[in-house]
Image (tube, rainbow, N blue to C red):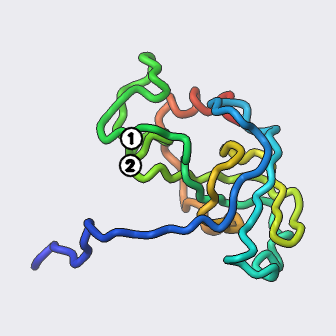
Amino acid sequence: MSTETSSDVSTQITVVPIGVVAGGRAEIRDDNWATETARILLDGTLLEPAATQGLAAFSHLEVIFFFHRSTRARSGAAHPRSNPHWPRVGILADRTPHRFNHLGVSRCELLAVDGLELTVRGLDAVDGTPVLDVKPYVEEYGPRGPVREPAWTRQLMGTYY
């Protein structure tokens, strides 16, 4: 029985931003995102105003975005935030913006929907960040069963939001 797959990892993918983060934090800082309020301005040349119909019924969003100001990519292991008190972990065990494709995923509170303008709080993306997709957060899509994570992530996230 073969374990080969037919996927071709060399396939190129083109992604078009559907909007941009406006306002909120201008500078990149790691912590205290909980009170940051920003707007996501969706592109009216790509989306019809009806694209946000029903979205206001949700309290939170998942936002996929591009770390447009990340200037490097890591492929191996490092201490998260260069903190020597935390273990070296591989890039796939860290949520750093210095990833090969510079993709970020964030969950944030949805405060308002006004046509193609979304007002959010707690989005950990800076002003000018290209938004690739927006999805309503639905608890049932969350993990099933207990979540396991190392102690250093709790320390790191202690002041993140």
Question: Is 78 drawn above or below residue 34 in the view shown?
Answer: above
Q: Report crowding for label 2: few under 14, some 14 to 19, many 20 or more residues within 10 A (C-alpha).
A: few
Q: Report crowding for label 1: few under 14, some 14 to 19, many 20 or more residues within 10 A (C-alpha).
A: some
Residue tagged 2: 100
Q: Residue furthest left?
A: 1
Rendered residue at 59%/63% (across/down): 132
Report x, y in % for residue 45: 71, 76
The N terminus appears in which quarter of the rendering? bottom left
Q: Earlier in the sequence, mark 1 or mark 2?
A: 1
Q: As rendered, which of 159 and 142 lies closer to the eye?
A: 159
What amino acid is found at the position of numbered circle 1 in the picture?
Answer: Ala
SS for callout 1: loop
Rendered residue at 72%/69% (across/down): 43
Horizontal side of 1 relative to 96 (left or right) equals left
Q: Residue furthest front?
A: 45
Residue 36 in which image quadrant = top right
What amino acid is found at the position of numbered circle 2 in the picture?
Answer: Phe
Horizontal side of 133 relative to 70 (left or right) equals right
Report x, y in % for residue 89: 36, 34
Residue tagged 1: 73
Residues under numbered marks 1 and 2 in contact, where contact means CB atoms less than 8 Å apart: yes
Q: As rendered, which of 147 and 124 lies closer to the eye?
A: 124
How far apart marks 1 and 2 lie (CA) works out to: 5 Å
Horizontal side of 11 relative to 56 (left or right) equals left
Question: Is 158 drawn above or below residue 109 in the view shown?
Answer: above
